[in-house]
Amino acid sequence: MPVIDVHAHISTQPWNDSLAKYNEALEKHYRFKAVVKTEAEMAKDFVDAGVKGMIIAWDAEANTGMPRTPNDYVARVIKDHPDAFCGGWAMIDPWKGEMAVRELEHAIRDLGLNGLKFQQTAQGFFPNDQRFYPIYETCVALKVPVQFHTGFTGLASGTPGGMGIKLKHTQPIPYIDDVAADFPDLTIIACHPAWPWQEEMIAILLHKGNVFQELSGWSPKYFPDSLKREIRGRLQDKVMFGSDYPLITHQRLFADYEAEKYPAAILDKIYHQNAERILGISA
């Protein structure tokens, strides 16, 4: 069946540079060895897996001091490899003020990216801080969705003090719930199972019609039991497949989804139907 990966990072040199000080901790947490690939080699991973990916830029300069993976670069990779990628996400440092808004407009209008992604632990901000509301207002005007990281992060996992990374920035209530309530016309995608706050995330998903969840970064066998149950029931139309490539391979995720014995109709929704409906894209 068609598969859309709505949350894939890149495995080329720019992203390796952006995450350089976190790479060792990421490798230990995910038990993988990072391999820097060319754009063509990366695209082949998606083609070989039978996946159309949505890849993500990176910008957390203000909080981490690390270089960007530019939106222009990601847009070019998507354009050069249409057999592998069906879209992508801009990433913009919210602390850049008016520059952030201008970069968002450029990423959507000029580059054709599909929406905006935040990683609040890396970027060091709370989504419901009203200083950042002009960014969401721009997303509403541009009619594009926003991804927010939720729950645990592998960034700096296991290091002393987590290298200053603070998990509180990714708690769903009140931070994401507030934004969902204040911007009912904004489509919000919660990234990853939101452990240890998955119950909060389920409550938001059931309460806020404009909030959805993608399931990247975790093998489905490790999903909290409550999430497994809701995927089979009330949330089957609100969840989407994501990998967190290159941290987890598509092949492993497909095998683990099959092992969970989800009905074929639900897998169709997870793998592509929900993304097509929610994001207006096609596999």
Image: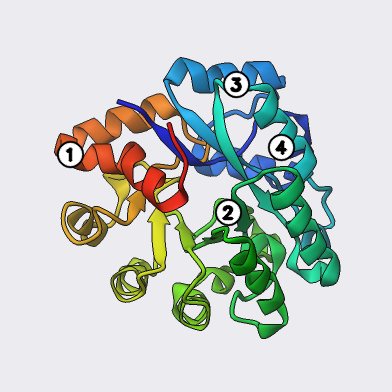
Cβ atoms under marks 1 and 2 closer than 8 Å: no
How far across and down, in percent of the image, does residue 180 sit? 47, 76
Task: Give the number of the disc on residue 157.
Answer: 2
Q: Which residue occupies 55% across, 24% down?
A: 84
Image quadrant in which you'd find residue 33:
top right
Report the amino acid beneath label 3. Answer: Ala
Numbered disc 4: secondary structure: helix
Report the amino acid beneath label 1. Answer: Ala
Numbered disc 1: secondary structure: helix
Viewer-side label of 1, 2: 1
- Judge by depth and name the residue closer to the eye, 93 or 248: 93
Res. 214 visible in picture: yes
- Judge by depth and name the residue closer to the eye, 226 or 141: 141
Q: Is residue 172 above or below residue 156?
A: below
Numbered disc 2: secondary structure: loop
Report the amino acid beneath label 2. Answer: Ser
Crowding around mark 2 (Cα neighbors within 10 Å: few <14, some 14 to 19, many 20+) is many
Q: Give the mark, 2 or 4, whose residue is nearer the N terminus.
A: 4
Q: Is residue 49 left or right of residue 233?
A: right
For the residues marked 1 and 2, what is the alpha-carbon distance in whole angstroms?
36 Å
Cβ atoms under marks 3 and 2 closer than 8 Å: no
For the residues marked 1 and 4, what is the alpha-carbon distance in whole angstroms?
33 Å
Q: Give the mark, 1 or 3, whose residue is nearer the N terminus.
A: 3
Q: Give the mark, 3 or 2, whose residue is nearer the N terminus.
A: 3
Task: Give the number of the disc on residue 265.
Answer: 1
Image quadrant in which you'd find residue 160:
bottom right
Q: Give the mark, 1 or 2, whose residue is nearer the N terminus.
A: 2
Q: Give the mark, 1 or 4, whose residue is nearer the N terminus.
A: 4
Numbered disc 3: secondary structure: helix
For the residues marked 3 and 2, what is the alpha-carbon distance in whole angstroms?
28 Å
